[in-house]
């Protein structure tokens, strides 16, 4: 090779090698998130309203992010199994949790030892939806909350209320209702909404606190009767049913809600990407209408809104658990 050409070749070769060496880490640092499928862990069994909500979100978020989002159902221990799994996952944004208020406020309120921390173990990404609770009774029982309170005080041993589990939001809601109204009600826990509402229809309990999702079909069929909504606002599905606050107990507000969470330590840019994707999806009219059709109330809010809600509600739920003696089984 000609000496000049050889010198030029060597110079280019060295320059190219230097460029390649410097470009490799830059490419790694600027990899676009996400560049592979994500996973959404749902802490409930397949088939329920929460599972439907999670799968709907997974499809919409996957389309928004440009990568499929795979759903993994991991029920058990009052959402603790799923929450622990995600809390221990790599903080890279590829493993997410559809957390319930049970995960973030009720479990910590009634358990001294918990395998995750509701604040320090997660990066909150946004509130998804509220699931209101209803006070329901038999068709021949009291027709209003006021009637129930009066009759229960007159016959303190007569009324018991069912919930879909000890330590559930239904249990907390029932105990809050007893404190606010002075109603004399004995709690009877069941292992889910179906057995609780079946017991109500069979008059094994006289009252139940359950979700609007589980209760509404039975209300429309005339099998059970709504007495009051535990949330602050009336429901679109049941606009004729008054709230507890409207029934004479101002300020009463209790329900269950869902939030999207990632492991703690999520990189800021990854967090921003996921927060924006959730906000965009939640604002879609089709998604909002689907939530409403399930009996859910769209409640979009960013990660800061999740943290604020936990900070506000956790002391309240701890007070309810202490006052009512609610402890984990």
Image (cartoon, grey):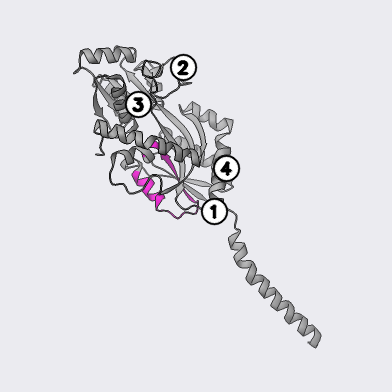
User: Pointer 3: what residue?
Assistant: 210
| Sequence-wise first label, 2 or 4 | 2
Relative to 38, is 317 on the left or the right?
left
User: Pointer 1: what residue?
Assistant: 36
- Residue at x 44%, y 50% (from the top left corner): 263
Distance, label 1 to label 4, CA atoms, is 18 Å
Say which of 280 and 71 sits in front: 280
Q: Mark 2 against mark 4, which lies toward the viewer?
A: 4
Give residue 245's mark.
none
Residue 225 % position (x, y): 35, 16
Q: Mark 1 against mark 2, which lies toward the viewer?
A: 2
Distance, label 2 to label 3, CA atoms, is 17 Å
* The magenta stretch spans residue 83: yes
Relative to 11, is 73 on the left or the right?
left
Q: Is residue 29 above or below residue 82?
A: below
Q: Which residues are magenta?
A: 80-102
| Sequence-wise first label, 3 or 4 | 3
User: Pointer 2: what residue?
Assistant: 239
């Amino acid at each position: 090779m000609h000496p000049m050409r050889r010198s030029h070749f060597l110079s280019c070769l060295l320059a190219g090698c230097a460029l390649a060496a410097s470009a490799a880490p830059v490419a790694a640092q600027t990899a676009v998130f996400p560049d592979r499928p994500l996973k959404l862990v749902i802490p409930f069994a397949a088939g329920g309203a929460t599972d439907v909500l999670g799968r709907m979100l997974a499809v919409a978020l996957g389309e928004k992010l440009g990568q499929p989002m795979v759903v993994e159902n991991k029920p058990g221990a009052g959402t603790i199994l799923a929450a622990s799994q995600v809390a221990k996952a790599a903080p890279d944004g590829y493993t997410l949790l559809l957390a319930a208020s049970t995960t973030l406020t009720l479990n910590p309120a009634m358990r001294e030892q918990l395998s995750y921390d509701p604040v320090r173990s997660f990066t909150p990404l946004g509130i998804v939806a509220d699931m209101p609770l209803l006070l329901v009774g038999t068709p021949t029982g009291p027709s209003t909350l006021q009637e129930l309170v009066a009759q229960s005080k007159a016959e303190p041993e007569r009324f018991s209320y069912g919930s879909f589990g000890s330590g559930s939001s239904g249990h907390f809601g029932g105990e809050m209702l007893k404190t606010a109204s002075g109603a004399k009600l004995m709690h009877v826990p069941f292992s889910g909404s179906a057995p609780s509402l079946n017991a109500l229809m069979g008059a094994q309990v006289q009252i139940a606190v359950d979700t609007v999702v589980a209760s509404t079909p039975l209300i429309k069929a005339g099998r059970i009767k709504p007495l009051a909504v535990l949330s602050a606002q009336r429901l679109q599905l049941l606009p004729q049913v008054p709230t507890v606050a409207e029934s004479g107990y101002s300020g009463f507000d209790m329900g269950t809600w869902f939030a999207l969470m990632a492991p703690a330590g999520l990189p800021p840019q990854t967090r921003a990407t996921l927060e924006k994707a959730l906000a965009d999806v939640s604002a879609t009219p089709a998604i909002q209408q689907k939530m409403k059709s399930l009996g859910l109330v769209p409640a979009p809010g960013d990660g800061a809104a999740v943290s604020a809600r936990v900070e506000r509600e956790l002391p309240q739920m701890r007070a309810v658990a202490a006052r009512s003696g609610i402890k984990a089984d």
